[in-house]
Image: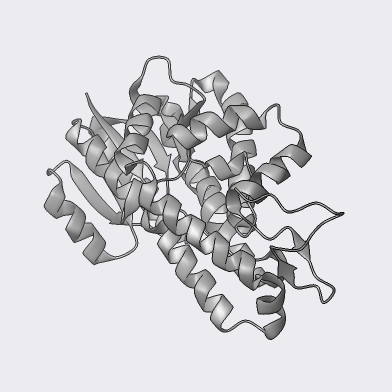
């Protein structure tokens, strides 16, 4: 019997690569995209087994329609699983990020996954399909200037842990993919929004956080350029979906494989120090509250990585 899989956020990056990879393995893929032109671009690179569908995970009607489409298709195939990949990255200092941006971050990265799980659960229970979600190193190691993104991925860790136990009686496996830096447009989009916020930000934000935002931006650009190929993530998704003994978590890339185990044993203060050094972030503030990188702190010179 043919096997079917649903991939959200398949327009670009990890989602696109995953959809094409699963298609190349012979699976029937329903690839969720936001725009028709993205779907046509996918068709050009895929076989006839891949079907683009309009799917905004924050739109309940879209999600229910997708479940209905896949349900009819699954009448002559088995739903192997859903791959929750749609996501965005909101960046900036916590105190200056508007609440509507926080809500958007969670609507897509967390509540969108809950919506997918609820809508597809009848099909998953019938087929004993699997739930695979794209988490992040940021879900285990929070980083400054990307708190909304990290918070949403922390929440996804908890959601996946709960689902894994709740759904065990029906044989539904739940796995979390945990990439480190990946070459993907998600950070370009997030950085563009962050840069726009900085340009239009009040003087107070630029005074307090200007240096930190610029450094964090450069670090994100560097990680995006040197990150792993999205195909490595797609192969982890493949194992989570198809292996007879899938793992519960899949760190992907050297960065994630090194840092995630360390976070289990590293004291919070030491993690903070590591982030300051690796990120080359300002360590002190002068008398006006502005961040600086060259001041002395309690008679010690700042340590630069």
Q: Residue drawn at (50%, 35%), measured in percent from left and top? A: 256
Q: Residue drawn at (53%, 52%), measured in percent from left and top? A: 109
User: Is 291 positioned to the left or the right of 250 in the image?
Assistant: right
Q: Nearer the viewer, residue 180 or 300?
A: 300
Vertical arrangement, residue 102 with respect to residue 75, above or below: below
Q: Residue drawn at (25%, 65%), measured in percent from left and top? A: 36
Instruction: Say if residue 230 shows up in the picture.
Output: yes
Vertical arrangement, residue 273 with respect to residue 58, above or below: above
Q: Residue drawn at (56%, 26%), measured in percent from left and top? A: 167
Residue 44: x %, y % from top left: 12, 54
Total tally of numbered discs in the picture: 0
Residue 130: x %, y % from top left: 43, 29
Instruction: Say if residue 64 shows up in the picture.
Output: no
User: Is 212 positioned to the left or the right of 228 in the image?
Assistant: right
Q: Quadrant of the N terminus?
A: top left
Vertical arrangement, residue 130 with respect to residue 109, above or below: above
Residue 247: x %, y % from top left: 47, 21
Vertical arrangement, residue 164 with respect to residue 134, above or below: above
Residue 56: x %, y % from top left: 41, 60
In which image quadrant can residue 124 be found?
top left
């Amino acid at each position: 019997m043919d096997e079917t899989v649903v991939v959200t956020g398949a327009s670009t990056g990890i989602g696109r690569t995953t959809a094409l990879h699963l298609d190349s393995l012979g699976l029937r893929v329903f690839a969720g995209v936001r725009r028709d032109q993205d779907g046509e671009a996918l068709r050009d690179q895929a076989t006839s087994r891949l079907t683009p569908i309009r799917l905004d995970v924050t739109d309940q009607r879209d999600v229910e329609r997708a479940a209905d489409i896949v349900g009819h298709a699954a009448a002559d195939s088995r739903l192997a699983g859903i791959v929750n990949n749609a996501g965005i990255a909101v960046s900036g200092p916590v105190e200056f990020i508007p609440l509507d941006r926080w809500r958007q971050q969670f609507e897509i990265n967390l509540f969108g996954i809950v919506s997918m799980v609820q809508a597809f659960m009848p099909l998953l229970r019938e087929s004993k399909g699997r739930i695979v979600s794209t988490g992040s190193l940021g879900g285990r190691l929070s980083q400054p200037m990307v708190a909304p993104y990290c918070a949403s991925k922390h929440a996804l860790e908890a959601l996946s842990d709960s689902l894994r136990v709740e759904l065990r009686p029906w044989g539904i496996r739940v796995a979390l993919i945990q990439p480190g830096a990946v070459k993907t447009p998600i950070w370009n989009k997030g950085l563009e929004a962050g840069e726009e916020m900085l340009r239009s930000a009040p003087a107070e934000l630029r005074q307090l956080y200007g240096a930190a935002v610029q450094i964090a931006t450069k670090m994100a650009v560097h990680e995006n350029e040197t990150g792993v190929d999205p195909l490595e993530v797609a192969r982890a998704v493949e194992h989570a979906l198809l292996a007879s003994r899938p793992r519960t978590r899949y760190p992907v890339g050297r960065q994630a494989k090194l840092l995630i185990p360390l976070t289990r044993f590293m004291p919070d203060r030491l993690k903070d120090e590591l982030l300051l050094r690796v990120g080359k972030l300002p360590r002190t503030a002068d008398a006006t509250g502005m961040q600086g990188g060259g001041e002395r702190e309690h008679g010690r010179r700042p340590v630069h990585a």
